[in-house]
Image: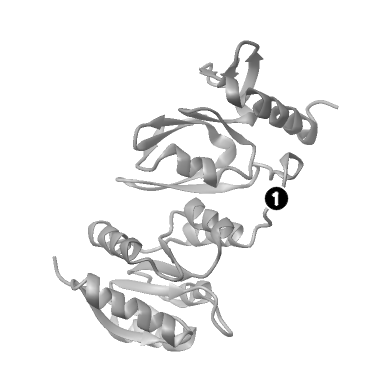
Amino acid sequence: MEALRAVVIDDETNARQAIISLLQLLCPEVEICGEAKNVDTGLELIRKQHPNLVFLDIQMPGKTGFDLLSSVEKADFGVIFTTAYQEYAIRAFRFSAIDYLLKPIDPEELQAAVQKCKTQLSAVSPQQLSILQEHIDEPRPHGLKQRNSNANQRIALPTAEGIHFIQMTDIIQCESLGSYTKFHLISGKPIVVSRLLKEYEEILDNYYFFRVHQSNIVNLEHIKRYVKGDGGQVWLSDNSEVEVSRRRKEEFLALLSDFYVNSGKIG
């Protein structure tokens, strides 16, 4: 494969140099064809160099990385965001299926991101950016009473065929298939994503989803019946039955009660 032509756009000189130095050391297949310190000079650089890959900071003086992408006439390059956002905001990147590197840059994560771009180079879509922006500054709730509604929320699911944009209310359950996660939906075929169920547990933690068992996360909106037992079972809207782990039972029932109260389904 030909070398990846990359540009680095970040307002911090040290941050740009750190990425460039690591790329030169660890990723010789990446050709650095320029760097820029803000959105305006970054746009000029992209239009001049036509890179395959852009390392892009989010927060820059005056304009953001989002502003840059919305200003590009044709975003025909891969994007890896570089960000100083802490862990709670990383959920937003996972929701949108957009690649990111958390500052300070981890060398192994940089190599993995570049490798992914080599095998699956694709531009960030407007839908992905919209989902990212919806979640990036979302308040971090504390406790059961402050979980966010599933309504009007979307998630991007990357597969070998492309990225699926799914309403969270359409997800019945997520099922572990080893290194993959299978999304069962209210309509259409299930979607299988090459990510661990644990990742989606972290992503959906602020919403009315719950990991009832080692192998299953269920959407509380789709629970039709709970059957008491050692741990119990739940019947879902597609008539599937999922076991509830004994050690998760108490927390699950508390969240289920909270969901029904806050959704107005019971008084």
- Residue most toward the front? 247
Find residue 37 and report its horizontal and vertical position in percent.
45, 87
Residue at left offset 36%, top offset 85%: 35
Residue at left offset 14%, top offset 70%: 2
Q: Which of 200 and 192 is in front in this view?
A: 200
Residue at left offset 59%, top offset 43%: 205
From the image, which quarter does the C terminus lie in? Answer: top right
Q: Is residue 239 above or below residue 1?
A: above
Q: Is residue 74 above or below residue 262?
A: below
Place residue 106 in its image quadrant: bottom left
Total labels: the figure holds 1
Place residue 19 in its image quadrant: bottom left
In the visual, does 231 lie left or right of 102? right
Q: In this view, does 49 lie above or below 28?
A: below
In the visual, does 190 lie left or right of 131? left
Q: Is residue 166 above or below residue 234?
A: below
Find residue 129 and report its horizontal and vertical position in percent.
50, 62
Quickly name the residue at label 1.
Answer: 141
Find residue 124 and report its horizontal and vertical position in percent.
41, 63
From the image, which quarter does the N terminus lie in? Answer: bottom left
